[in-house]
Image (spheres, helix red, strand yellow):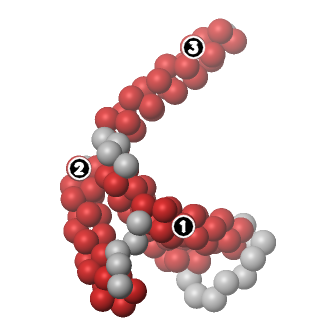
Amino acid sequence: MELETATEQALRVRRLYHQLEERLEGSAWSAKDDMLGFVNDVGTVSRLVMAAEGRWVPEGDVADQTAGKLAECLWWVLVLADRLGVDIDDAYRSTMDRIEAQLSARIDETD
C-alpha cells in the first residue's frame, strides 16, 4: 500500500475515533493525547518483541498481536504527521535517501 493511500485511510479512521471521543469524553483527543496513545502502543510492541524472543509470556497469538500493534503504530505515525503538518511520504523518502547515502559512503571508506 502506498503511504498516500494509507494516510487517507488512517485519517478516515482517526475522524471516526474523534467522533467517538467527542461523544464519550466531550472532546476529541489533542495531538498530545495521540502521542500518548502512540507511546502506549510502542510499549506493547516492546513487550511483544520480548515475547517473540521468549522473554515474556502474553496471552494469545504473539505473531498476530505483533502484526496488529505494528500496524497501529504506523497508523499513529501517519496521524501525527498529518496533525503536525509533516509530508510523511516526502520526509520518509528524503530521510532514507540521506541515511542510505551516508551509510554507503562509510562502507566505501572501509573498503
Q: Residue at x 22, y 68 (%)?
A: 12
Label 3 – label 1 distance at C-alpha? 37 Å
Question: Amino acid type of disc 3?
Answer: Ala
Q: Residue at x 47, y 24 (%)?
A: 98
Which secondary structure, mark 1?
helix
Q: Is residue 73 above or below residue 16?
A: above
Q: Position of residue 53 (x, y in %)?
A: 72, 67
Residue 52 in sight in this render: no
Label 1 – label 2 distance at C-alpha? 24 Å
Question: Amino acid type of disc 2?
Answer: Glu
Precedes in sequence: disc 3 or disc 2? 2
Q: Are marks 1 and 2 in contact (CB under 8 Å)?
A: no
Which secondary structure, mark 2?
helix
The residue to which callout 3 is attached is: 105
Q: Position of residue 85 (x, y in %)?
A: 32, 45
Instruction: Please tell me which residue lies in front, 43 or 48.
Output: 43
Q: Is residue 21 left or right of residue 32?
A: left
Precedes in sequence: disc 3 or disc 1? 1
The residue to which callout 2 is attached is: 4
Q: Residue at x 42, y 26 (%)?
A: 97
